[in-house]
C-alpha cells in the first residue's frame, strides 16, 4: 500500500510541473567573466535584470576578485563606468588578507552573480542581485571559521574608467556624476556605521570601522548600487531594503520564470534545458525599463552591440511571443512600447530610443504584431489587453494596403517614407537580401514609396496577420469583423499562390511589378507561405524538397537566408546573403511541421543544435550563424535568436 501511495505521489508531482526548474541547477549557462580596458567595448557577455540600465560581470583576472566587473551603464549607447567599482579588501592587525591566494569560485546563476573565497580560516561570499529597475544590491558576508576572535579592517576601492565622470561623497554614499549632469551612479553603503571615504581624482577608498568577529560568527555588509538616466528619477527618499528578503524574492521570481517555461516546454535533454535557460537569461539581460522617451519596458536586440540600444518593431513582436511563456508582463510591454509611437496614419516606427528624435520613421518592419498579441492572449486570457490594442492592430494592418500597394491589386510591396531604396530594404528586415539588388522606387503618395516588386514574405505575413486579427476579433465577439478578415485572407491566399509560386521550380519567389516577372532568387522568403499555411500539400512538399537539398539549404547549419548554390552566397560578408538567422529557421521548420513533415523538421533542428557554435555550450546565442562552418556571426546575446530558441524547444524541436 505504501509503495502504491508513493507511486501516486510521484505521479502527481510530475503532473504539476518539472521539479528540475530551480536556478541552482543551471550554473554558468553563459561565461560572463570579463576584464574591461575600453569603456566602449560592450561586445561581451554580462548580467542585468528587471529592466535596469546597468549591468555587471564576474572577474576573469585574479587581481579583480572581490569585485563585480563594471558597471556597464546604458542609454543610447553603452559605457563601462569602471572595471571594478567596489573591490573588497580585508586586513587583520594591519596585514592584508591576500584574497588572490584563496580557494575561489565564481558562479553566474540565473538572476544572481556569486563569488566565494576561503582563506586563513575566513570564508567570504559576495552576491549581486537586482532589486528594481534602477538598483542592484551586493552583500558581502564574512565568516570567522577560526577558534579565536578576529579584528578585521574592511574596505572597498574603485577607479572610474570614464574620463569625464567624477566622484563625490556624502554620509555613507558615493556618487559618480556624468558630464550631461543628468545621469548619476550612486553607491549607498547600507550600514549603521559611518564609512570613511578618501577620494583621489578618479579613485576612492571606503573604509569601515574595525569589525570584531567572534569564532563561528558572520557579518554582512551591504551596498546598493543605483543608476539613474535622469535626475527626476531620483527618489525623494531611499527605500529601506533588506538583502535577505530581496534574495528570497529574487529566487522566487527566477524559479517562477523557469517553472513557467518548463511547465509548457517539456525539454527532457539536459543540454537543451541549459540552452533554454541561456535564452531566458539573454532576454532578461536585454530587458530595459521605461526611461526618458521610452514609455513602456522593452527588449534590446542586444546590449552586447552598440548599434542595438533601442527597441525595434518586429524584434519586439518576436520577443513577445517567447516572453509570453515566462514573463507575460514584459511580453505585453514589448508590444505596447512600439504602439506608443504609432502615427495617425497607422504606421509603426522601425525603431525607437530613449531620445525620440532618434526614432526611425523612414520605414517600418514586417507585420507580426497580431501574432504576438494572440500568443500573449493564449497564455494570459487577458481580454482587456486585446480590446485595448486591437484597434491599433487593425489600423496598422490597413496602413500597409493604403501605403504599400502601388497598383492596388491587393498585394503589397516593401517601401519607405523618404523614397530611398536603403530604407525600403530595411523595411523588409532583410536589409541586403539578393532579391532586392535590382529594385527601383515608385511613389505612392507624399509619404509613401514602394519598391517595384511585390514580396512573397510580406504578403504571407499579411495573410497570417488577417487570421490572427480574425481570432482576436472573435475573442472580442466582433463576429462580422472576424468573418470579413477570414474572407479577405482566403482571397489573398489565392492571389499569393497564383502570383508568387512557380510550378516549374516548386518554390515561391518575389514578383516584379513591371512585366509580370518572378525574381527567381531562392531565399528564406520562399518558405514563409508554408509557415502561414498558404501552400497546398503538394506545393509544400515541393518547397520542402528544395529546403532539404544539400546543395541549397540543407547545409551544416541548415536553412541559410540564400541558397548555397547562388553565385552571391557569402555568409561572412553577406549578413542576409547566406548566414542562418534563427527566426527564418523557425519559420522554415514550423512550415514543415504544419504539413506533417515532422521527421524532416526534426532532422534540420538536430543539425542546428549540434552544429551552431556555442548553442549547447556556454557560448553566446548569436545574431546569426555561418551555414558551412557553424561559426556564430555578428552580435552576441541576440534577443530574437534567443526568443526563437525558446519557441523551438517549446514546440518539441
Image: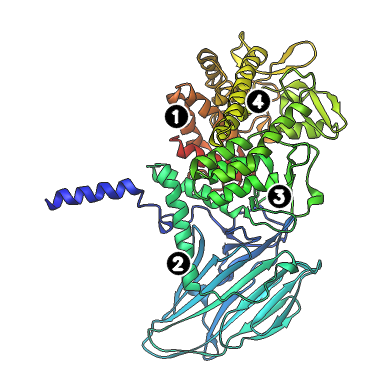
Quote the CA–CA distance across marks 3 and 2: 31 Å
Nearer to me, 80 or 301: 301
Residue drawn where x is 77% and y is 69% of the image:
178
Q: Image point 78% across, 67% down: which residue?
A: 182
Q: Quadrant of the C terminus?
A: top left
- Numbered circle sitting on residue 610: none
Residue at the image position 75 percent from the left and 69 percent from the top: 231
Sequence-earlier tag: 4 or 2: 2
- Label 4 sits on a secondary structure element that is helix
Report the Cα–Cα distance between label 3 and label 1: 35 Å
Reading the image, the residue beneath label 2 is 248
Q: Answer with the quarter of the image where residue 365 lies.
A: top right
Q: Is residue 271 visible?
A: no
Q: Which residue is mark 4?
A: 457
Query: In this figure, which residue is indicated by the disc labeled 3?
Result: 310
Q: CA distance from mark 3 to mark 4?
A: 25 Å
Q: Is residue 291 above or below residue 629?
A: below
Amino acid at each position: 500500500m505504501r509503495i502504491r501511495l508513493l507511486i501516486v505521489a510521484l505521479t502527481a508531482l510530475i503532473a504539476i510541473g518539472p521539479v528540475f526548474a530551480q536556478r541552482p541547477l543551471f550554473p554558468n549557462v553563459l561565461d560572463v567573466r570579463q576584464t574591461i580596458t575600453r569603456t566602449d567595448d560592450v561586445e561581451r557577455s554580462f548580467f542585468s535584470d528587471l529592466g535596469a540600465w546597468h549591468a555587471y560581470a564576474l572577474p576573469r583576472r585574479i587581481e579583480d576578485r572581490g569585485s563585480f566587473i563594471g558597471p556597464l551603464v546604458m542609454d543610447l549607447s553603452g559605457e563601462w563606468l569602471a572595471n571594478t567599482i567596489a573591490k573588497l579588501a580585508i586586513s587583520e592587525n594591519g596585514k592584508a588578507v591576500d584574497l588572490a591566494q584563496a580557494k575561489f569560485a565564481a558562479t553566474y546563476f540565473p538572476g544572481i552573480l556569486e563569488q566565494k573565497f576561503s582563506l586563513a580560516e575566513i570564508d567570504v561570499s559576495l552576491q549581486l542581485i537586482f532589486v528594481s529597475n534602477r538598483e542592484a544590491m551586493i552583500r558581502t558576508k564574512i565568516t570567522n571559521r577560526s577558534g579565536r576572535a578576529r579584528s578585521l579592517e574592511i574596505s572597498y576601492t574603485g577607479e572610474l574608467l570614464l574620463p569625464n565622470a567624477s566622484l563625490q561623497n556624502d554620509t555613507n554614499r558615493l556618487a559618480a556624476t556624468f558630464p550631461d549632469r543628468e545621469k548619476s551612479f550612486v553607491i549607498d553603503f547600507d550600514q549603521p556605521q559611518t564609512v570613511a571615504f578618501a577620494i583621489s581624482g578618479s579613485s576612492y577608498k571606503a573604509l569601515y570601522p574595525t569589525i570584531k568577529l567572534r569564532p563561528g560568527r558572520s557579518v554582512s555588509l551591504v551596498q546598493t548600487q543605483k543608476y539613474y538616466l535622469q535626475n527626476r528619477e531620483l527618489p525623494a527618499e531611499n527605500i529601506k531594503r533588506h538583502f535577505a528578503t530581496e534574495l528570497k524574492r529574487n529566487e522566487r521570481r527566477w524559479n517562477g520564470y523557469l517553472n513557467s517555461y518548463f511547465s509548457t516546454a517539456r525539454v527532457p535533454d539536459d543540454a537543451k534545458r541549459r540552452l533554454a535557460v541561456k535564452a531566458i537569461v539573454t532576454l532578461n539581460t536585454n530587458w530595459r525599463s521605461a526611461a526618458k522617451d521610452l514609455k513602456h519596458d522593452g527588449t534590446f536586440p542586444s546590449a552586447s552591440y552598440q548599434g542595438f540600444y533601442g527597441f525595434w518593431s518586429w524584434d519586439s513582436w518576436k520577443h513577445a511571443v517567447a516572453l509570453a511563456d515566462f514573463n507575460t508582463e514584459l511580453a505585453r510591454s514589448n508590444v505596447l512600447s512600439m504602439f506608443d509611437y504609432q502615427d495617425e496614419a497607422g504606421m509603426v516606427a522601425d525603431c525607437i530610443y530613449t531620445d525620440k528624435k532618434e526614432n526611425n520613421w523612414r520605414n517600418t518592419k514586417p507585420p507580426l504584431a497580431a501574432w504576438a498579441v494572440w500568443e500573449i492572449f493564449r497564455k494570459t486570457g487577458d481580454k482587456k489587453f486585446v480590446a485595448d490594442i486591437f484597434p491599433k492592430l487593425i489600423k496598422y494592418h490597413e496602413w500597409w494596403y493604403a501605403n504599400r500597394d502601388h497598383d492596388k491589386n491587393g498585394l503589397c510591396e516593401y517601401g519607405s517614407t523618404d523614397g530611398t531604396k536603403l530604407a525600403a530594404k530595411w523595411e523588409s528586415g532583410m536589409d541586403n537580401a539578393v532579391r532586392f539588388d535590382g529594385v527601383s522606387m515608385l511613389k505612392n503618395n507624399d509619404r509613401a514609396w514602394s519598391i517595384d516588386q511585390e514580396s512573397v514574405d510580406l504578403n504571407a505575413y499579411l495573410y497570417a496577420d488577417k487570421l490572427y486579427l480574425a481570432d482576436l476579433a472573435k475573442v472580442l465577439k466582433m463576429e462580422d469583423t472576424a468573418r470579413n478578415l477570414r474572407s479577405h485572407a482566403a482571397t489573398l491566399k489565392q492571389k499569393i499562390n497564383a502570383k508568387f509560386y512557380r510550378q516549374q521550380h516548386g518554390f515561391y519567389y518575389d514578383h516584379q511589378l513591371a512585366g509580370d516577372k518572378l525574381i527567381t532568387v531562392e531565399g528564406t522568403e520562399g518558405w514563409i507561405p508554408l509557415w502561414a499555411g498558404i501552400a497546398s500539400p503538394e506545393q509544400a512538399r515541393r518547397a520542402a524538397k528544395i529546403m532539404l537539398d544539400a546543395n541549397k539549404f540543407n547545409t551544416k547549419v541548415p536553412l541559410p537566408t540564400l541558397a548555397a548554390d547562388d553565385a552571391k552566397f557569402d555568409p561572412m560578408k553577406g549578413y542576409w546573403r547566406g548566414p542562418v538567422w534563427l527566426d527564418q529557421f523557425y519559420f522554415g521548420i514550423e512550415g514543415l511541421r504544419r504539413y506533417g513533415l515532422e521527421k524532416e523538421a526534426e532532422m534540420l533542428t538536430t543539425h542546428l543544435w549540434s552544429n551552431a557554435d556555442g548553442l549547447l555550450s556556454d557560448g553566446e546565442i548569436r545574431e546569426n550563424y555561418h551555414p558551412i562552418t557553424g561559426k556564430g556571426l555578428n552580435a552576441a546575446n541576440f534577443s530574437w535568436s534567443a526568443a526563437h530558441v525558446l519557441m523551438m524547444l517549446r514546440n518539441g524541436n
